[in-house]
Image (spheres, rainbow, N blue to C red):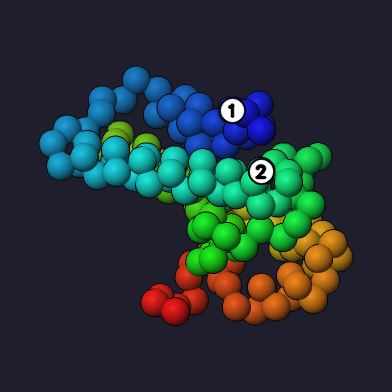
Amino acid sequence: MVLFTVVMPGTFAGLLPVLIVGDKAVAGGATLVLACGLFAFGLVIYLRSAWDFAVFGSGTPAPIDAPKRLVTQGFYRYTRKPMYVASLTVVMGWATLFGAAVLVGYAIALFVFFSLFIRLYEEPRLAREFGEEYATYASQVGRWLPRRFGG
């Protein structure tokens, strides 16, 4: 799980944004605080979700060691894709930190890539593997954003 976390989200949400902006100066003041908040929020979402994969799903975020049970705990109660949301949140943290519109464009491109991967591979695999359990879950929990709050 650690290797996958370093290689995949670490590359897409950590290394590539920094390489894209190069040596651009970072923001200060309230913008720096906002960027750090986005980093922290994204990191907490990702780590908790990876933990839930291991503890409740008996697997990892890596497709070669996917959870054996459908994970619906933690942030998965609110969104079916919290790890993707976490990665995009971190990228937006970088965009905020550097004041770089190019990173907003990068986040949009990642969102499109993630969406295609989810719709063409991940969700059909989950539907085959977990059947009615996944269908019920998908009907109750939004893919990206919570469908409702407080209930």
Q: Quadrant of residue 116?
A: bottom right
Residue 15 location in percent, x, y?
50, 27
Q: Is residue 68 visible?
A: yes
Q: Quadrant of residue 25?
A: top left
Question: Vertical placement of 94 versus 131: above or below?
Answer: above
Identify residue for label 1: 6
Q: Which mark is residue 54?
A: 2
Residue 65 percent across, percent down from the top left: 78, 40
- Crowding around mark 2 (Cα neighbors within 10 Å: few <14, some 14 to 19, many 20+) is some
Q: Position of residue 102 (x, y in %)?
A: 41, 41
- Crowd rating for badge 1 (residues with CA inside 10 Å; few <14, some 14–19, many 20+): few
Residue 117 visible to an observer of this rendering? no
Q: Would residue 76 appear left or right of 103 to someone viewing this image?
A: right
The residue lying toward the viewer, choosing from 11 and 58, is: 58
Kind of residue indicated by mark 2: Ala
Left or right: 60 with respect to 28? right
Q: Earlier in the sequence, mark 1 or mark 2?
A: 1
The residue positioned 52% from the left and 57% from the top of the image is 74
Q: Nearer the viewer, residue 47 or 118?
A: 47
Dot 1 amino acid type: Val
Instruction: For marks 1 and 2, give the CA distance.
Output: 16 Å
From the viewer's side, name the closer residue of 143 and 49.
49
The C terminus - image quarter: bottom left
Q: Secondary structure at mark 2?
A: helix
In the picture, which quadrant includes the N terminus?
top right
Front position among marks 1 and 2: 2
Among all residues in the image, which is located at the extreme right?
A: 128
Secondary element under disc 1, as helix, strand or loop, is helix
Numbered tag placed on residue 96 in the rendering: none
